[in-house]
Image (cartoon, rainbow, N blue to C red):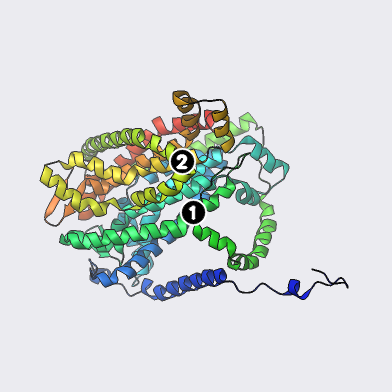
Amino acid sequence: MAGQGGFPSRGVLRRPGLRWVDVLVAGALVALLYGLLRLAPSLDAPFLPDQAPATVSTDASELPYYAVRSLLRMFVALVASVLFTFVYATAAARMRRAEKVLLPVLDILQSVPILGFLSVTVTAFINLFPGSTLGLECASVFAIFTSMAWNMTFAFYASLTAQPRELDEAARVMRLTKWQRFWRLDVPSGMIPLVWNGMMSFGGAWFFLAASESISVLGHHYALPGMGSYAATAIAAGNLGQVGIAIAVMVVMVIGVNVLFWRPMVAWSERFRVEESEAADRPRSVVLDFLRRSSVPERLARPLRPVGLALDRGTRVFGLAEHPLSRTVARERTGDVFFAGAVTAVVVYGAWRAFDYLHTTVGLGEFGHAFWLGALTFGRVILLLVVATAVWVPIGVWIGMNPKVTRFAQPVVQVLASFPANFLFPFATAAFVAVGISLNAGSILLMALGAQWYILFNVIAGASAIPSDLREAMTNFQVTGRLRWQAFILPSVFPYYVTGGITAAGGAWNASIVAEVVDYGDHHLTASGLGAYITDATATGEFPKILVGITVMSFYVVALNRLLWRRLYRLADSRYAL
């Protein structure tokens, strides 16, 4: 309050005292930085490929260290995936000609199994950092990145292409630069699906943790300290007790990441929801409440504001965020012809060199065998998608449209989706052997454990993104039962389901690599399929067969995307975008 002389009282000028919530947040940040600094030297330890260990210690006292190493790789891969998503999805959505190349390339990248990337990148990263473990760490992080990035990119691309026209017109009227439009319109409008799909991708990456930390490629075997390599060592030894310990630690890790990171992100992303009436019950997070009550984030962000203003000014040279409303048809067609010719020339040359290499090694007849095995895996993928759609779409709608249920069910779903199902493969192997189930049928269940969650998470995100005013309108008009599903719910979640379906299909193809070949102790089960073909070729170092398997798998995935999923994308964009 002001005194009689007009000056503020002493209490007004006094700075707020240090609060306990600030001490807690600052202490957590200091502990995080200290842990990273202590961990840094081990990331650059000496490394010799011929003397590298093929297993890790299964001493239980090492588990906290393994957990931290695995979490660090996961979050580094997540940051890289977000950066890749922003660049790649924006280019595909905003550049018409580039979209015709970038989307098929993304289809192919999604179809390439993790072992396909490892067979190429491990040697390259080791040579990039000779004599250092950092090369193997980069290969492991890159493998985890490949299991996250494609799903997030598809989700962000879908949000950019489904932006309401009035938002585009508002960006033009406000004369936003491309940089300003990206951060003030594109990212906020795509934040909810990006967070949900990031959470799903992070959970799916746990599935491939063992393959990315216990690496068997081209006749060599390397093991990095981590939970994946610990589980792989225990499974190879046939020690169910140690596998059970790994499962318990993984459950704690998944719950911890969900509570400390993903639930705050989900609650924070609600600020970007666009609707006329506010939802009665929104997701909440205790951790986010702590951060909002603390002044530490504000003090850390204060020095960065001049940097943001400088970037706003510096990026004006790239022009405004607008494109011509009309184009010259003749000029556009000429550009399309030259662009298509250049792309065709590159593709034809690359295909000719690849087929020439295969002709002189394994012979082109190997493709016939690979296509037959691919048809078997394709049948498993289609059956998985049909069953997962019938089961998880109604459940996802029920969860997403009930915020109270979402708060309870989302952590449970996150644990189920994030838990690496291949940790359970030893128990599944024992059950299959005891019951007499062939892996040709059992592999469908194993693939579903790693792929079905994409559909569930995207449907939950779609149902939770339905504006409250539309829900209230349906209630006021007493639209219920079958009509409510046909006219309101299914059209609303359809764009999200398409994104989930295409990523679930890609995830199922990737999961076939570990689901069609299962080892536990002295037991070795193999299914007839393309996943088993690629796994065997990678383990024995037969690079021509690896190339054949990846090419055939890419053909199946891209063909399915072109014939089915892309058409559904266009339908969702033209008829069902909110």
Residue at point 31%, 42% (across, down): 509
Q: Secondary structure at mark 2?
A: helix
First in sequence: mark 1 or mark 2?
1
Residue at point 57%, 28% (across, down): 476
Give the number of the disc on residue 400: 2
Quadrant containing the C terminus in the rendered view:
top right
Q: Nearer the viewer, mark 1 or mark 2?
A: 2
Query: Percent position (x, y) of residue 156?
Result: 51, 45
Residue 469 position by quadrant: top right
Q: Is residue 578 visible?
A: no
Where is 479 relative to 85, above or below? above
Query: Percent position (x, y) of residue 193?
Result: 50, 45
Q: Say whether residue 402 is left or right of residue 552.
A: right
Q: Nearer the viewer, residue 61 or 375?
A: 61
Where is 343 relative to 37, above or below? above
- Amino acid under label 1? Val
Task: Check if mark 1's residue and mark 2's residue have beta carbons within 8 Å.
Answer: no
Where is 539 relative to 26, above or below? above
Query: Percent position (x, y) of residue 148?
Result: 41, 51
Query: Percent position (x, y) of residue 45?
Result: 34, 74
Instruction: Write down the residue under mark 1.
Output: 82
Give the number of the disc on residue 295: none
Q: Secondary structure at mark 1?
A: helix
- Amino acid under label 2? Gly
Quadrant containing the N terminus in the rendered view:
bottom right
Q: Is residue 574 visible?
A: yes
Q: Say whether residue 171 is left or right of residue 474.
A: right
Label 2: how many Cα within 10 Å (few below 14, some 14–19, many 20+): many
